[in-house]
């Protein structure tokens, strides 16, 4: 059975600044292959950081932008550290700086 994505892209100044091109990514832990989160990637290029306001699932991670969150992004199953909590100074946005090689990603189709 296929998963149906019921999320809509966030359309704001950040998306427009990156050319208006967006896609949803499913991120998985490379250690245990478990699902980490659903993320909206704006613009071209590699995935260096995850902006907290672009995380759509799971529910525990969706409202981190509103909180004073300073913890690492960790896999719930194998406790592998995926990224570190930072404030991206150029845009003054809360984000996770990702450790390359700790996650894999798959582009999902919007239904």
Image (tube, rainbow, N blue to C red):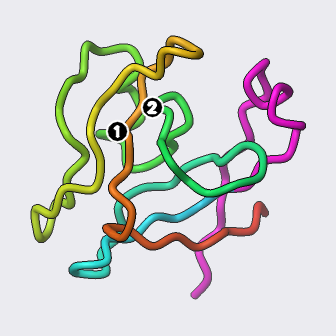
Which element is circle 1 on? helix
Q: Position of residue 100 (x, y in %)?
A: 39, 62
Vertical arrangement, residue 28 with respect to residue 44, above or below: below
Reply yes or no: does residue 15 show up in magenta: yes
Q: Which of pointers 1 and 2 lies earlier in the amino acid sequence?
A: 2
User: Which residue sits at x=15%, y=63%?
Assistant: 80
Reply yes or no: does residue 48 show up in magenta: no
From mark 1 to mark 2, how far is it between C-alphas? Answer: 8 Å
Q: Determine which of the numbered discs, if any, sits on residue 52 in the image.
A: 2
What stretch of residues is rendered in magenta?
A: 1-23
Q: Determine whether label 1 and label 2 are within 8 Å by CB.
A: yes
76 or 72, nearer to the observer? 72
Q: Position of residue 32 (x, y in %)?
A: 22, 81
Vertical arrangement, residue 98 with respect to residue 105, above or below: above
Q: Determine which of the numbered discs, if any, sits on residue 61 in the image.
A: 1
102 or 109, nearer to the observer? 102
Q: Quadrant of the C terminus?
A: bottom right
């Amino acid at each position: 059975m296929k998963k149906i994505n019921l999320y809509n892209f966030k359309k704001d100044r950040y998306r427009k600044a990156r050319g208006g091109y967006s896609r949803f990514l499913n991120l998985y832990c490379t250690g245990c292959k478990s699902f980490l989160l659903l993320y909206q990637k704006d613009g071209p290029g590699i995935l260096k950081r995850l902006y907290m306001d672009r995380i759509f699932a799971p529910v525990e991670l969706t409202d981190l932008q509103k909180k004073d969150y300073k913890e690492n992004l960790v896999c719930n199953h194998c406790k592998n550290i995926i990224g570190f909590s930072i404030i991206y100074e150029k845009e003054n946005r809360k984000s996770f700086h990702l450790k390359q090689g700790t996650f894999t990603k798959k582009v999902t189709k919007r239904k």
